[in-house]
Image (tube, rainbow, N blue to C red):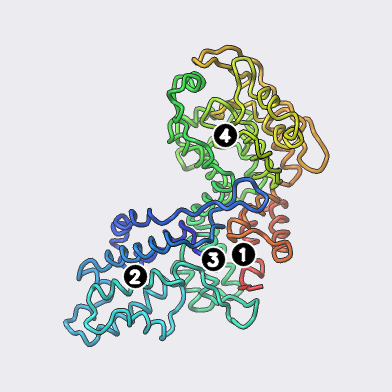
Amino acid sequence: MPRLSRTQLGNSLRFAIARALPREADAIWAKVAPTFARYPTDQRTPAPGDLKGGYSRLDQSIQQAQIDAMYDLGQAVAQELTGSDARRNALLGSCASDGQTANDRACLETFIRGWGSRVLRHPLPAAEVTAFADIAGSTPVDRAAVADVITALLNSPWFLYRVEHGTDASQPVSPLSAFELASRLSYQFWQAPPDDELWAGAVNGSLLTEAGFAAQLNRMLQGPQLRSSLDEFVSEWLRLEELPSLVALRNDPVYQAFVGEEMPTDAARTAMFEDVQLSAWQTIVSGGSVSDFLHDRRSYTGDHYLASIYGVPVWSGSGPAPVIPSQNRGGLLTRAALLATGTASTRPIHKGYMVRNALLCQQVGAPPPNTSDRPPSPTEDMTTRQAVTQLTSGGSCGGCHNQIINPPGFVLEGFDALGRERSVERLYDPRGHVTNTPPVDTVAEVRVYGSERRLVSSVAELTQLIDDSQLFESCIALQYFRFSQARVESTSRDGCLLSEMEAVARSGAPMADMLKALANHPTFKQRSFQ
């Protein structure tokens, strides 16, 4: 019984408000948004053995802070929806304003059957309608009574969770009902309740047919609502939020000297995130494959600072995006969001771990307990690579760093800590004066699969090596499974589905087909308590 993520909860609340008072929905949401801001943020939950990463959807805890915030949210929404007689009348219809009180109860029950069913995402049986209506007490049904009913509906487990009984609750594995399947589809791809068309497919039963399900799935994968879910997946998978502020060190002499004449802004940081997210989105809408996403060399930014890093004009957001001219830009690995650090140092250890763990799904052992959490930095006479090698090549650190972590990070040394291409590394004294400009060494022996090592000298070569191994394709299939299912995979339970997703990702088929493979698998349409 998955708890709605914070994003899904916000979308569900906005849906509920818009269903009630569509013309005032934006204004009402603006009023309750400060209350929603108090709802606790979901915590990123990494898979067992991973040192970082993970997905906020995997946080299925429920705490008193969430209960309190949700109750206040229900009350805030209810007070806004019933804030005047006009709004109450708009909710309940003409029977609420006809001067009679005898029909108030019937009027309220009609509202619960209609609005309440859409909010709780299943047709409410008579007993539930009666139970919610009883909260209002005896007639006449005033504004406060209606607000109590709305508060109760928005705090129902049916609202806060995706409740799935299946069509045969006595069996450990049961087909989902049409309405349960509609909710699973909508929250899977749109992070929101079923829209009118999907709901209609559940009502008339067409969603349970092969043709009806395929039509709805294709519609959802082609709809713009998919993008917000894809953006969240890409951001959490690639740990984009780990990039610190680009202006936090603006008063540091070394950082000032490193940056040069124009200091980046946090708007540029946001643009870096969007550039990666849009690469994934454009791959989906253009029919590109997972491999195309890895190799994509187009710039998707309207930010002049980021565009100048890539050496391209700003993108208007429509039409073909400009191609980054440098052949050293090897696609995803050279997106500024994955290269920038917020400091003057490139942090090859962090990048090497990111390649291994996020892009190849390879686990790396935890560092020794006494390891410093401060990344090695260059000095006046020592490059970043030399500083990292000196610190990590010996003792208990050497095994992981020399063979696994450091090599891919060193290959990325051809780009500085803002993502700018470079052939030399400028070294500084504490006052920001350049002390030396040694050439950058990007050559490293990289082992991607098994024991085979290959000498790599550029990011383009590293990208191709990763693509040839097809581990990236397998990894993105696994990562999307974890994100969308809000849980870590089980070999016995999920092995067949993961194999199918992996095969699609590796086949060169459109990236959207990998998403579709998950929904088309028989387990997607089942409720399992096994």
361 vs 69, left or right, is right
Q: Circles 2 and 4: CB distance less than 8 Å? A: no
Tell me where residue 92 appears, x and y as whole percent.
Answer: 28, 76
Q: Which residue is mark 1?
A: 519
| Number of disc labels | 4
Tell me where residue 179 appears, x and y as whole percent.
Answer: 51, 74
Label 3: few (<14), some (14–19) or many (≥20) C-alpha neighbours in 10 Å? some
Q: Nearer the viewer's eye, disc 3 or disc 4? A: 3
Q: Amino acid at mark 1?
A: Ala
At mark 3, the secondary structure is loop
Q: Quadrant of residue 20?
A: bottom left
Distance between mark 4 and mark 1 Cα atoms: 34 Å
Q: Amino acid at mark 2?
A: Thr
Which residue: 30% across, 67% down? 78
At mark 4, the secondary structure is loop
Q: Kindly give the residue lying farthest to the left in the view shown.
A: 99
The quarter in which the C terminus is drawn is: bottom right
Q: Circles 3 and 2: CB distance less than 8 Å? A: no
Q: Which mark is residue 2?
A: 3
The quarter in which the N terminus is drawn is: bottom right
Distance between mark 2 and mark 4 Cα atoms: 52 Å
Q: Which residue is mark 2?
A: 151
Q: Amino acid at mark 3?
A: Pro
Which residue: 57% across, 34% down? 323
Give above or below for 464 relative to 384: below
Q: Which residue is mark 4?
A: 323
Q: Nearer the viewer's eye, disc 2 or disc 4? A: 2
Q: Circles 1 and 3: CB distance less than 8 Å? A: no
Distance between mark 2 and mark 1 Cα atoms: 34 Å
Q: Earlier in the sequence, mark 1 or mark 3?
A: 3
